[in-house]
Image (cartoon, rainbow, N blue to C red):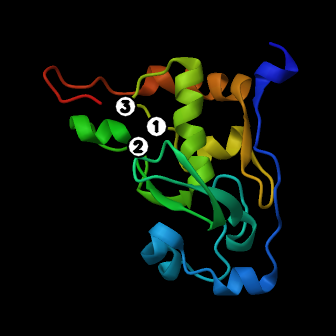
Amino acid sequence: MTECAKFVCKRQLLKVPTIEDFQNYRGGHTHKKWAALPVDWRCPCCRRSRFEILTWTQTRMETGRVPTGEYKWLAPLHGHHDHRSHAGVPPRFAQTTICGDCNSADGRAKRHLKLPADFSFSPLELSLFVIGTPHNGVQFDLEVAKKVYESIAPLLPPIPPGAKRL
């Protein structure tokens, strides 16, 4: 695999927040999760701090697909969970708050590797192939992601027949 294909790259760095920008940030659309986190929280996947996940981001329309042209500080957080639990399979890991970039990396790695949509990498597994850069998102190593999946796939319990799948 070429170096370009091995890593899915981060975005271009546009701006670095000041301490004042950080102190004035209230969590955007994930404000309740932001307020509930301890001050010293770090994403368990990329290990970036609350300050380091803050990025200068172009806003989008309600659909999330069309950029508006305006920029603002954003540090989205997600309750990452095992999607197989939707099909009645016991979850492999507890729901965990992770940064939006790592949550997106989970989905992007699955799409690149053509993995089942209802599979989810755990935060620990994501930490093995995700590399965070302060204020600039994450990149991830597809070769390592593939090896991680191949090591756990044989251990995954089957989804019950007739279960709702993603």
Decide: few, some or many residues near mark 2? Use Cα within 10 Å; few <14, some 14-19, many ≥20.
Answer: some
Earlier-in-chain disc, 1 versus 2: 2
Residue type marked 2: Arg
Q: CA distance from mark 1 to mark 2?
A: 9 Å
Foreground of the two, 69 or 84 = 69
Residue at 58 percent across and 19 percent down: it is 113
* Element type where label 3 sits in the image: loop
**Residue 21 horizontal/vertical position (percent):** 73, 81
Residue type marked 3: Asp
Residue at the spot of label 3: 118
**Residue 116 horizontal/vertical position (percent):** 42, 23
In the image, residue 38 above or below residue 62:
below
Count of numbered labels shown in the rendering: 3
Residue at the spot of label 2: 92
In the image, residue 29 above or below residue 150:
below
Residue at 25 percent across and 40 percent down: it is 86
**Residue 16 horizontal/vertical position (percent):** 83, 67
* Element type where label 2 sits in the image: loop
Residue at the spot of label 1: 120
Closest to the camera, between mark 1 and mark 2, is: 1
